[in-house]
Image: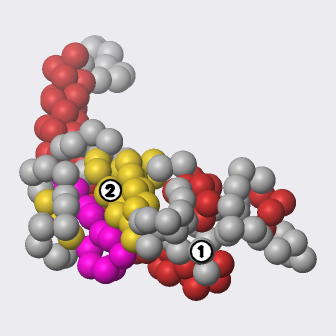
Amino acid sequence: MRRKQKGFSLIELLIVVVIILVIAAVAIPNLVRSRMSANEASAVASIRTIATSEIVYSTTYTVGFSANLASLSDGGAPANCVPPAVPAAASACLIDPLLASGTKSGYSFTYTPTGGGGVNNTYSINADPVNAGLSGQRHFYTDATDVLRVNVTAVASATDPAL
């Protein structure tokens, strides 16, 4: 009388491994595309947040637009944003410190204030993927006109089409 075999044969295990690898090969590219889409959506939302914060900053402090992204944040000290303390123009508490650092969700944000006479009367913001093709594909731009512009192949500018 033969004994009943317990467990799986090597062939059965190899077949299961091959099936898992085929499923992974189909799923991973979709995961990368999903992550890029999420990063791009986050970059658009972050640019809009910065633009809105600049308008609030300009009307609140009446000194023009901010000198840098850090001025829109807590100034490096979260205690600056706790009431009853009144934030100064150097720590407006309008954006989160992560966005103020210039990098968020796979995108790098470049803020450039411009103006004359010590007053920043305009600005521009670029959002570019940290690793093009992995963290995002599109480049974004906006300025004091608050029109969001996009470029797929290069750094976006004021001449690119609106999103």
Q: Quadrant of residue 1?
A: top left
Q: Disc 1 or 2, which lies upstream in sequence?
A: 1
| Quadrant including the C terminus | bottom left
Q: Amino acid at mark 2?
A: Ala
> Residue furthest toward the front?
117
Q: Give SS at disc 1.
A: loop
Identify the residue at horizontal 49%, vertical 65% (top origin): 117
Q: Amino acid at mark 1?
A: Val
Residue 33, above or below 160: above
Give the percent coordinates (x, y) of residue 14: 19, 23
Badge 2, how many Cα within 10 Å: few under 14, some, many 20+?
A: many
Give the percent coordinates (x, y) of residue 27: 20, 47
Please say whether residue 12 is visible from this viewpoint.
Answer: no
Part of the protein shown in magenta: 137-148
Is 154 placed left or right of 100 in the picture? left
**Which residue is identified by label 1?**
63
Identify the residue at horizontal 12%, vertical 67% (top origin): 160
